[in-house]
Image (cartoon, rainbow, N blue to C red):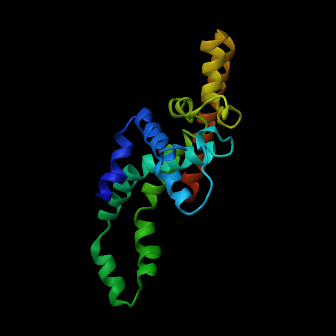
Amino acid sequence: MLQNVAYIPHFLSAVIVVSIMQLILNPNTGVYNMIRQWFGLPVTNYFASVGAFKPMYIISGIWQNMGWDAILYIAALAGIDTTLYEAASIDGAGRLQKIWHISLPGISSTITIMLLLRCGQIMNIGYEKVLLMQNSLNQASSDVISTYVYRVGIQEGNFDYSTAISLFNSVCNILLLLLANAIAKRVNGTSLW
């Protein structure tokens, strides 16, 4: 059951994830606000709150990706030779020492590659989930480059300006990826190319 709760959100569309969030955080019928009322706390409409948008987006992103990331890290851990753990146990190493000296170095290349893949998407947050969560009450804190490009290019018809912004965003992403790749290659010896 816990594995399904962790893995399934990665395979769900942004529409379904935001719908689940709206059901859970609904000020009238949502489970979260019902629990808050039970403890005597006030009901809050998080989708109308300017300050709640970023934490909601980050938490939903972690929830949506943690299952897939767990699959990758578990697969990397399965590739570590078990005799290393047995030898460490014989030498008297504790659980934290085994993690620090065997597990983390064993999956460091996977950690580096995952970090590099995420660095290529830092400025490309995506507009689907943001547009679904965005409304006129939280737009001040929920506007990102992708939604700005959509608003300027599609809604206002200023195609040349929105194309320039999108191109600049892509160039910045490439530069960040090249920089992160060069640092990873020097520090860890692992890189994308």
How many numbered discs? 0
With respect to residue 83, does 30 lie above or below?
above
- The residue furthest top is 157
With respect to residue 65, does 121 lie above or below?
above
In this orientation, which residue lies closer to the viewer: 150 or 167? 150
Left or right of residue 9, residue 117 in this image: right
With respect to residue 94, does 56 lie above or below?
above
Q: Is residue 20 visible?
A: yes
Expressed as whole percent of the image width and height from the top left, the position of residue 140 reads 71, 34
Left or right of residue 183, residue 86 in this image: left
In this orientation, which residue lies closer to the viewer: 90 or 28? 28
Quadrant in the rendering for residue 179 = top right
Name the residue at 39% across, 34% down: 13
Expressed as whole percent of the image width and height from the top left, the position of residue 178 reads 59, 40
Name the residue at 67% across, 22% down: 165
Expressed as whole percent of the image width and height from the top left, the position of residue 59 reads 53, 50
Q: Quadrant of the N terminus?
A: bottom left
